[in-house]
């Protein structure tokens, strides 16, 4: 693998910085980083479909929101420990992924996009109307419970401990998703993106394989949703609406679905710029929309793809200059 | 005809598309180790026949048995797992993946390592060794890190065959492997096919009569969706009906 | 019985919305059937129709003028979008085209909020269309009947053009067999561009007449695009008759849903869609691929 040792050093550095970050930045900024981490998981789960699987979904908020509701309800009503609640939130996302996936993974391209969007709306409308369970538009508020590790109570209410908790979950999720890309199942996902028909004729059951990928994607979206709800100590229909579904699409696309960390870059960049610019510029969303359109037109692999092609061109020029 | 050694047994096969019968009452046998060429004019139904055998289409009527088991109507991946593998007339590869990975995906499938998410592929020594063997066989080991889509046409055709071979089938079906190639390239592909399919049953659709006569020990002529003649090359060469229908006009140039 | 007497009224309500929906959906489904492009910005074009009409009304006070000018402007925008943006990403495939039109819808919505504000706008309807009409023992708002009349008139003309004229036959042929039409030497890109213009204009017209009825607000694009997508899936992707049937069904479903199962009303169309997908995945009148 190209520069893999260098890659490890880089990853270790990033983790180190994340570990000491609370010492370096204000609590306000730390909260921003927590948001970035949660959305990174969400965007990476989305990229399992988008960048790696070649499927454009307009309905990934369904799994995020379903996970969020599941976590909140389980933790609040059944007094479950938070880590278990978040894990079950992920499983709820996976379950919904199975239920919808049975229908949607038959499709590709535009029909896939349409169907995922419609299913997202179905879930959204259900959350809005089934007030007894979801609280409708008012949502459900709850308090992040303390973490109990065999008698040792850790207070998750404070930003610092909560930051480390989210960091731990994020590292686990990102690690799993990264490892997946190195395994046969992860590689198969790429094969199906490239040529699903061919994969079928060398013995892959592509329908079932896509379904498994879809379920996994739902799982990690559900975990992200559970974390987000626990972070805000609140869940409402905005967790599950079309805006949420298109947010994750924008983050992933702008960052670039073609590289593993592209979606992470996209979500961090958008959250950061949104925070910096929205105070100065009321109409920041127009800038974001323009950036998106420009990338769609001129850099279909997003910012990370743009960076990569610039670097390659630069490298080519350099070798071209030395060779003749 | 005895049934001993029969690998593929097609009886009374029909296929119609919205009322148009593309295959009608086609009966055909392929024995173990046989090298069977399918020839016939354009539109005779050769590729449709391949699509019926490999599960892309479901026959309207009739049966296809492979090793005595009915495969007509089965899903393509199940037919492939039973030991039937095919290549395509129009190059059908994974263009955005490396040459190595193209072949490896087929090796993984052959070994049944399809959904594993606990082990890394790079650590699977056996898989990677077999992949390199196939790459050496098709002469693409030097290009293994390149994207498959960036290869030239001839190399892509070789890869097409390589992917089909890599699942280690008992019956390999090649759909015009030399389509669009120069004489030089065709010679390369013929020797590749000859080397890689030795000892296996081979079905090959081919327009180039030199290729057909150099590779096949049995030839079946398909005309208007049914078998016009079937037998050893010499018998086919001298068959007057075949000459009328096909060889006369479609003489290799 | 109380319920019985409201049935005709509810039916009319459903019909009005259904036909308005079809007015927007017709362009969307034709473009989709013909080019495989699903125009996410189609709802935004409809919204622009409503806002353009609002501004024209404020400057001139002429409702009838706005009914002509606003659709023409929106149609021109449709042409510009096809010619200068969509064509550029065509080679990346349909999903990429969908991304582009999604981005456009996003920007248009933000621009509308910027220019006209976040608040719903009140659009005055002409005096002759306000009030209501008495027929037998039913009283019905004149303006809604006007919407119905315009919609039916437009799609009657549309069907006549599509199935009775040479140009229309080319378009319908292109929907099912675009490669054949290409082979016949017809300038397919030009036909696509004009179709975008006509589809946009129809959406714009729907916006003009629908604005006063459904309230002109920045969320109206997002609201209608969901209904439009359901229409496309339920009716069969690319089928005009299917879109008509589906629009009618969704209009009635919403209308009677609110009456009978108010809690569930908004979910009904998605349930309908789910049922269609399970029973007939290609849509009610769709072609089996």
Image (cartoon, rainbow, N blue to C red):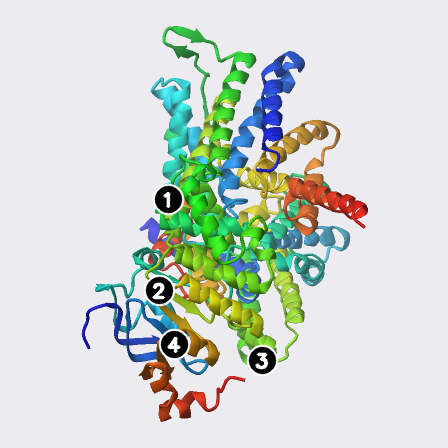
Q: Give the CA separation, mark 1 to mark 4.
A: 34 Å
Residue marked by disc 3: C165
Mark 1 or mark 2: which comes first in sequence?
2
Mark 4 surroundings: few (<14), some (14-19) or many (≥20) residues within 10 A: many
Q: Give the CA separation, mark 1 to mark 3.
A: 58 Å
Residue marked by disc 2: B54
Are the residues flagged by discs 3 and 4 in contact, CB closer than 8 Å? Answer: no
Residue ID at (48%, 26%): A172
**Residue B113, which numbered label?**
1
Residue A157 picture location, percent across and down: 50, 12
Residue marked by disc 4: B38
Q: Give the CA separation, mark 1 to mark 2.
A: 22 Å
Split into 4 quadrants, where in the image is the N terminus of chain B?
A: bottom left
Q: Secondary structure at mark 2?
A: loop
Mark 1 or mark 4: which comes first in sequence?
4
Q: Are marks 1 and 2 on the same chain?
A: yes
Q: Chain of mark 3?
A: C
The answer to whether any part of residue B154 appears in the image is yes
Q: C283 and B18: which one is in front?
A: B18
Which one is in front in this view, the residue at disc 3 or the one at disc 2?
A: 2
Split into 4 quadrants, where in the image is the C terminus of chain B?
A: bottom right
Which one is in front in this view, the residue at disc 2 or the one at disc 4?
A: 4
Numbered circles on residues, count: 4
**Residue C267, which numbered label?**
none
Residue ID at (50%, 48%): B101
Residue ID at (38%, 33%): A92
Tell me if residue B92 comes above or below residue C162 in the rendering.
above
Q: Give the CA separation, mark 3 to mark 2.
A: 45 Å
Q: A256 and C24: which one is in front?
A: A256
């Amino acid at each position: 693998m190209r520069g893999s040792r260098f890659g490890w050093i880089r990853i270790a550095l990033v983790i180190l910085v994340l570990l000491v970050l609370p010492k370096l930045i204000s609590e306000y900024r730390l909260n921003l980083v927590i948001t970035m981490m949660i959305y990174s998981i969400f965007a990476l789960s989305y990229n399992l479909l988008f960048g790696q699987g070649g499927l454009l979904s307009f309905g990934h908020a369904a799994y995020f929101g379903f996970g969020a509701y599941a976590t909140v309800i389980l933790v609040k009503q059944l007094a479950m420990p938070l880590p278990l609640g978040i894990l079950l939130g992920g499983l709820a996302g996976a379950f919904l992924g199975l239920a919808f996936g049975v229908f949607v993974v038959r499709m590709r391209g535009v029909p896939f996009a349409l169907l995922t969007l419609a299913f997202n709306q179905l879930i959204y409308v259900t959350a809005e109307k089934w007030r007894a369970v979801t609280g409708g538009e008012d949502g459900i508020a709850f308090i992040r419970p303390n973490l109990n590790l065999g008698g040792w109570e850790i207070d998750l209410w404070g930003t610092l401990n909560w930051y480390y908790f989210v960091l731990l979950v994020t590292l686990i999720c990102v690690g799993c998703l990264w490892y997946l890309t190195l395994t046969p199942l992860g590689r198969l996902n790429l094969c199906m993106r490239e040529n699903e028909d061919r994969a079928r004729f060398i013995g892959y059951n592509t329908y079932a394989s896509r379904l498994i990928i879809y379920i996994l994607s739902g799982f990690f979206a559900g975990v992200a949703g559970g974390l987000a709800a626990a972070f805000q100590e609140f869940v409402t229909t905005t967790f599950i609406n079309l805006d949420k579904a298109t947010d994750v699409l924008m983050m992933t696309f702008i960052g670039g679905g073609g590289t593993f960390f592209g979606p992470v870059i996209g979500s961090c960049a958008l959250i950061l710029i949104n925070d910096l610019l929205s105070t100065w510029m009321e109409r920041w969303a127009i800038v974001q929309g323009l950036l998106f359109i420009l990338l769609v037109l001129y850099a279909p692999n997003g910012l990370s793809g743009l960076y990569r092609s610039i670097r390659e061109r630069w490298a080519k020029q350099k070798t071209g200059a030395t060779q003749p | 005809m005895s049934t001993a050694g029969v690998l593929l047994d097609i009886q009374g096969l029909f296929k119609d598309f919205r009322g148009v019968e593309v295959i009608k009452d086609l009966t055909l046998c392929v024995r173990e180790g046989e090298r069977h060429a399918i020839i016939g004019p354009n539109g005779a139904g050769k590729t449709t026949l391949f699509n019926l055998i490999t599960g892309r289409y479901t026959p309207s009527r009739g049966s296809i048995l492979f090793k005595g088991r009915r495969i007509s109507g089965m899903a393509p991946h199940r037919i492939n797992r039973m030991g039937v593998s095919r290549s395509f007339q129009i190059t059908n590869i994974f263009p955005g993946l490396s040459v190595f990975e193209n072949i490896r995906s087929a090796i993984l499938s052959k070994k049944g390592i399809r959904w594993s998410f606990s082990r890394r592929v790079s650590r699977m020594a056996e898989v990677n060794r077999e992949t390199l063997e196939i790459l050496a066989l098709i002469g693409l080991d030097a290009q293994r890190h390149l994207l498959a889509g960036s290869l030239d046409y001839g190399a892509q055709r070789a890869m097409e065959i390589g992917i089909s071979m890599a699942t280690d089938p008992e019956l390999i079906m090649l759909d015009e492997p030399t389509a669009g190639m120069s004489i030089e390239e065709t010679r390369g592909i013929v020797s590749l096919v000859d080397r890689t399919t030795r000892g296996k049953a081979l079905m090959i659709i081919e327009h180039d009569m030199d290729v057909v006569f150099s590779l096949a020990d049995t030839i079946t002529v398909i005309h208007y969706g049914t078998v016009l003649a079937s037998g050893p090359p010499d018998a086919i060469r001298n068959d007057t009906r075949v000459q009328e229908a096909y060889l006369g006009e479609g003489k290799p140039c | 019985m109380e319920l019985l007497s409201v049935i005709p009224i509810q039916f009319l309500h459903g019909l009005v919305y259904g036909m308005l929906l079809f007015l927007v959906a017709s362009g969307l489904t034709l473009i989709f059937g013909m080019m495989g492009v699903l125009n996410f910005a189609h709802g935004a074009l409809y919204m622009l129709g409503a806002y353009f009409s609002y501004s024209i009304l404020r400057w001139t006070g002429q409702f009838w003028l706005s009914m002509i000018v606003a659709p023409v402007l929106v149609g021109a925008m449709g042409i510009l979008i096809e010619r200068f943006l969509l064509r550029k990403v065509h080679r990346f495939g349909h999903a990429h085209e969908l991304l582009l039109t999604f981005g456009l819808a996003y920007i248009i919505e933000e621009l509308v909020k910027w220019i006209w504000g976040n608040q719903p706008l009140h659009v005055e309807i002409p005096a002759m269309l306000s009030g209501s009409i008495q027929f037998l023992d039913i009283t019905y708002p004149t303006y809604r009947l006007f919407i119905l009349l315009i919609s039916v008139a437009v799609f009657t003309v549309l069907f006549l053009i599509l199935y009775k004229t040479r140009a229309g036959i080319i378009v319908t042929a292109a929907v099912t067999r675009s490669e054949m039409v290409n082979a016949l030497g017809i300038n397919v890109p030009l036909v696509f561009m004009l179709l975008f213009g006509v589809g946009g204009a129809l959406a714009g017209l729907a916006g003009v007449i629908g604005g006063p009825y459904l309230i002109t607000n920045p969320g109206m694009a997002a609201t209608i695009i969901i209904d439009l997508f359901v229409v496309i899936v339920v009716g069969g992707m690319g089928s005009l008759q299917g879109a008509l049937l589906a629009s009618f069904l969704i209009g009635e479903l919403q209308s009677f849903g609110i009456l009978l199962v108010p809690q569930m009303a908004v979910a009904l169309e998605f349930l309908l869609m789910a049922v269609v997908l399970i029973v007939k995945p290609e849509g009610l009148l769709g072609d089996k691929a």
